[in-house]
């Protein structure tokens, strides 16, 4: 029996619209094939929204977001703001606000490693092979939301790093639940030797751990975790960490997967889920048909699995990507010296290839 879902598509800025087109096309294909009814709406956010409405997150977008079953997001950001730190209205305010408004406190980032891309990473294939990590990054607390100050003379700045017990507890529970379904190993990353917020973090994680005695818990300092991640990534399974540490660690981990263009993420809370590639708007390649659309397509697979419980459909998508890569097709960011130049594709051609394999893929 097919299901009915209403999906909001927010393409955003830069390469956002280019890659999101293919995420949406895959959703349409899955709906058709499995008899689901997916309806779509679109909305503005980021620089694109500032240009039209003056706000990075217009009320209309927020209302549509709250009324949808899931959101497919591209990326936001514009070079104009990157070079002007004093701009009061900024694209990223839209993203921070929607996370807060939708209560998206947990950001899930699976580090999926396609065997075909072992050589695309800067790490050695023998170190990478078999890596399978699921990051849980806290998303609505930490220095991102604490008070920000600048002294009157402009020479001193500060950002308040703050966490409340309930914020740590609710994401810890989500991470332990996931660990129970995986290999029952969880590593909590903090800086408890220096930071009070980390001491609270560790205390709460230790309490939650008692409810999951089957899960083997390890606590690691962020500096050590950053090092271990490239030294021996296989040692990690579920990684639980705060907002700032998670931001940095997951970008580091993107190199395990070969490129930012390969990683998807899900932001969840108690309501509508938000699905997006981990990359930004990539001004350097925007509008040139060079962006890798696979992270957006993998975001759709996460949406189907996490928000709609459609695991078979999600697997169908990852299988189609696997087949596309096995056939030798690459976008520029994941191509290497061994890639057949005739198989280096643009965004559009890569999207079309995945759709072709999606139609042909039979689940094994
Ligand atoms: N979630 C978001 O919307 C988000 C996240 C990070 C950065 N940003 C914004 O994006 C803008 C650019 O930031 P940045 O350059 O630090 O990060 P970025 O992720 O946009 O780009 C980093 C590098 O990775 C490459 N890259 C990223 N995605 C790619 C893809 N799909 N295919 C091929 N190559 C890809 C880019 O070309 C660039 O060289 C900034 O305005 C920043 O604020 C937005």
Image (tube, helix red, strand yellow):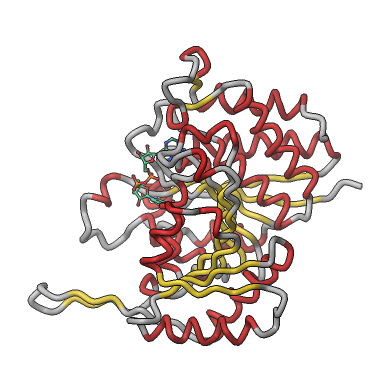
Foreground: 248 or 351? Answer: 248
From the viewer's perspective, tell me whether residue 360 is left or right of residue 333: right
Q: Is residue 73 above or below residue 293?
A: below
Q: Is residue 167 visible?
A: yes
Q: Splitting the image into 4 quarters, where does residue 362 fall?
A: top right
The residue most toward the right is 1
Q: Position of residue 192 (x, y in %)?
A: 40, 81
The single residue placed furthest to the left in the displayed view is: 153
Q: With 53 as the anchor, is 132 left or right in this view?
A: right
Residue that protrudes farthest toward the top in the picture = 342
Q: Nearer the viewer, residue 276 or 95?
A: 276
Say which residue appears at 69% left-offset and 62% top-offset. Answer: 183
Name above or below for residue 71 compared with residue 160: above
Looking at the rendering, the quadrant in which ligand 1 lies is top left
- Residue 89 place in picture, x, y as percent: 31, 60
Rendered position, 125 above or below 167: above
Query: Does residue 12 appear in the picture of this structure?
Result: no
Residue appearing at x 72%, y 68% in the figure: 180
Residue drawn 38% across the image and 76% down it = 191
Quadrant containing the C terminus in the rendered view: top right
Q: Position of residue 130 (x, y in %)?
A: 60, 46
Left-right relation of 298 to 262: right
């Amino acid at each position: 029996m097919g299901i009915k879902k209403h999906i909001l598509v927010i393409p955003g800025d830069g390469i956002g619209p280019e890659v999101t087109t293919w995420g949406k096309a895959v959703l349409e294909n899955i709906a058709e094939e499995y008899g689901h009814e997916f309806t779509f709406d679109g909305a503005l956010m980021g620089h694109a929204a500032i240009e039209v409405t003056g706000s990075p997150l217009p009320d209309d977008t927020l209302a549509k977001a709250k009324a949808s079953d899931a959101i497919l997001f591209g990326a936001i950001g514009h070079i104009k703001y990157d070079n002007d730190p004093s701009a009061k209205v900024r694209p990223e305010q839209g993203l921070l606000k929607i996370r807060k408004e939708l209560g998206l406190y947990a950001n899930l980032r699976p580090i999926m490693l396609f065997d075909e891309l072992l050589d695309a990473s800067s790490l050695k294939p023998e170190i990478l092979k078999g890596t399978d990590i699921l990051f849980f990054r806290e998303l609505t607390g930490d220095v991102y939301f604490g008070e920000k100050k600048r002294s009157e003379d402009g020479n001193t700045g500060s950002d308040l790093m703050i966490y409340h017990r309930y914020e740590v507890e609710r994401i810890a529970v989500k991470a332990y639940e996931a660990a129970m379904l995986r290999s029952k190993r969880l590593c909590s990353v903090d800086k408890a030797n220096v930071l009070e917020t980390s001491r609270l973090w560790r205390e709460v994680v230790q309490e939650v751990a008692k409810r999951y005695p089957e899960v083997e818990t390890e606590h690691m300092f962020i500096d050590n975790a950053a090092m271990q991640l490239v030294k021996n990534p296989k040692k990690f399974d579920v990684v639980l960490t705060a907002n700032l540490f998670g931001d940095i660690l997951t970008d580091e981990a993107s190199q395990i997967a070969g490129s930012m263009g390969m990683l998807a993420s899900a932001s969840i809370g108690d309501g509508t889920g938000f699905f997006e590639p981990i990359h930004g708007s990539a001004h350097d390649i925007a509008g040139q048909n060079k962006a890798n659309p696979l992270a957006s397509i993998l975001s759709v697979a996460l949406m189907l699995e996490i928000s709609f419980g459609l695991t078979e459909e999600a697997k169908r998508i990852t299988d189609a990507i696997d087949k596309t890569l096995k056939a030798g097709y690459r976008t520029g960011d994941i191509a290497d010296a061994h890639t057949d130049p005739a198989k280096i594709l643009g965004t559009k051609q890569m999207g079309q290839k995945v759709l072709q394999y999606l139609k042909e893929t039979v689940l094994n």
